[in-house]
């Protein structure tokens, strides 16, 4: 593995983490746990809680690690000026341009959904939704918001790198090394202990949450370290399956602690935070290793999926809620509604990507210029 080789497997992994947003957010609508976002259906199932908790453990940590990895790729291949220019084009501009229409659509759907949950009627009563949810909300573009903050931090660190010795300090590190492993797990544990769930999740407010920034910033840094010493991908690939199995076992241990804890100061809560951190760390190592090993060669369909995933993640909430709301009245089990919503949402995302996005201005905004002779 070299610094100039195209990393098809990690492109695919990034696309998969983005596209899992459909599965995660669809499951969220049918859980027993009250994790209301835009809509909560009367059909609920424990299986939806399991899917949501499992995906939520690794999806965004792995995504932010990949963001750190590809940001480092831009820096090491092209320099800090190109890195910042690219992140402006691919992160900041999509956030600024696409958030307003997304917010208008999702705020409207939220009002309709809250009325439907309130009395089963199709009406529009904005008073059911708090003003904070309506106006102080980055919606599912929160990850772009925090990614902007992390890129700014990286740019500042690289600007003063003679003092921080950024390059040298990262190129000698490995995620399988004791120094990085212990430091990463300890910091993730301490930050996770600040949340009742033992790990930090999304915050959609425009006011930056230092816990969210720090937790996912550590994941971003881990990805940067992987690219800085890219040969370690071979070691991560060697232990990928073992890492993923261990990650799942640590997740089970975390859930066992969660089921026993009585307050946020108990030993059970610290156990929850520690095992959650261990699980997140192992998932990052395992997924990086597995996908860099299995998807080394170019595939036109993998590339198509990778290119479409950015649009899928940004757009998917709109068709998802539109599809889910009419199912409110149908006497179907949660699992069936979930499958219907996932399937039709993915179909809507891929259709709109192909027809409206791929070769147009939106596609160029998200992925750069494409030409119709390529798949």
Image (tube, grey):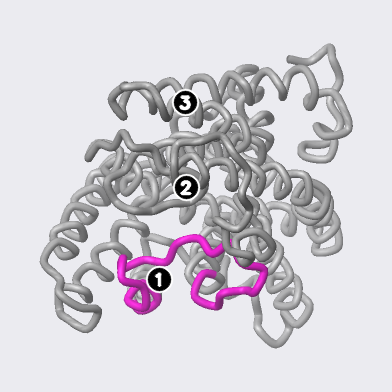
Check disc 1 and report the residue beneath it. Answer: 184
Q: Quadrant of residue 347?
A: top right
Graded by Cα atoms within 10 Å as few (under 14), some (14 to 19) or many (20 or more), the crowding at tag 1 reads many
Magenta stretch: includes residue 201: yes
Q: How many marks?
A: 3
* Left or right for 193, reference 147: left
Q: Is residue 267 left or right of residue 214?
A: left
Look at mark 3 in the image and give the residue it sits on. Answer: 341
User: In percent of the image, x 14 and y 61: which residue is there?
Assistant: 259
| Residue 93 placement, left or right of 262 | right
Q: Can the viewer see residue 214 in this picture?
A: yes
Image mark for residue 233: 2
Q: Which residues are magenta?
A: 190-212
Determine the CA span between mark 3 and mark 2: 36 Å
Q: Between disc 3 and disc 2, whose residue precedes? A: 2
Residue 102's place in the image compared with 136, above or below, is above
Q: Is residue 169 above or below residue 277?
A: below
Mark 3 vs mark 1, CA separation in Å:
37 Å
State yes or no: discs 3 and 2 in contact (Cβ < 8 Å). Answer: no
Mark closer to the observer (3, 2): 3
Decide which of 262, 218 is in the foreground and name it: 262
Q: Are there few (<14), some (14-19), or many (20+) residues within 10 Å of tag 2?
A: many
Residue closest to the eye, 306 or 291: 306
Dominant secondary structure of the residues highlighted in magenta in the image: loop
Which numbered disc, 3 or 1, marks the residue that appears first in the sequence?
Answer: 1
Q: Return the x and y of residue 342 as percentages of the image width and height.
A: 47, 26
**3 and 1 marks in contact (CB < 8 Å):** no
């Amino acid at each position: 593995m070299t610094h100039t080789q195209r990393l098809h497997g990690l492109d695919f992994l990034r696309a998969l983490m983005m596209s899992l947003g459909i599965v995660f957010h669809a499951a969220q609508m049918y859980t027993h746990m009250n994790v209301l976002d835009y809509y909560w259906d009367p059909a609920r199932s424990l299986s939806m809680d399991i899917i949501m908790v499992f995906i939520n453990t690794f999806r965004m940590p792995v995504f932010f690690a990949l963001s750190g990895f590809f940001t480092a790729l831009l820096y090491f291949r092209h320099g800090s000026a190109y890195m910042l220019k690219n992140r402006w084009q691919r992160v900041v501009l999509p956030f600024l341009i696409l958030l307003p229409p997304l917010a208008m659509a999702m705020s409207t759907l939220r009002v309709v959904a809250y009325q439907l949950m309130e009395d089963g009627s199709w009406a529009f009563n904005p008073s059911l939704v708090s003003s904070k949810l309506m106006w102080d909300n980055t919606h599912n573009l929160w990850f772009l918001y925090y990614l902007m903050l992390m890129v700014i931090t990286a740019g500042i660190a690289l600007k003063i790198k003679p003092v921080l010795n950024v390059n040298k300090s990262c190129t000698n590190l490995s995620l399988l090394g004791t120094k990085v492993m212990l430091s990463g797990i300890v910091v993730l544990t301490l930050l996770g202990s600040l949340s009742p769930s033992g790990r930090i999740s999304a915050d959609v407010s425009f006011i930056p949450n230092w816990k969210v920034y720090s937790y996912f910033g550590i994941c971003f840094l881990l990805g940067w370290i992987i690219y800085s010493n890219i040969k370690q991908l071979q070691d991560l690939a060697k232990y990928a399956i073992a890492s993923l199995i261990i990650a799942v076992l640590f997740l089970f241990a975390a859930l066992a602690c969660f089921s026993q804890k009585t307050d946020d100061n108990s030993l059970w809560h610290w156990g929850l935070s520690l095992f959650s951190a261990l699980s997140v760390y192992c998932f990052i190592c395992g997924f990086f290793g597995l996908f860099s090993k299995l998807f080394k060669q170019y595939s036109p369909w993998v590339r198509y999926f990778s290119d479409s995933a950015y649009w899928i993640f940004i757009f998917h909430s709109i068709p998802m809620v539109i599809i889910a709301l009419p199912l409110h009245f149908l006497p179907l089990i949660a699992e069936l509604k979930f499958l219907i919503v996932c399937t039709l949402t993915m179909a809507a995302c891929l259709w709109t990507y192909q027809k409206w996005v791929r070769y147009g201005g939106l596609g160029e905004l998200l992925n750069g210029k494409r030409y119709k002779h390529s798949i």
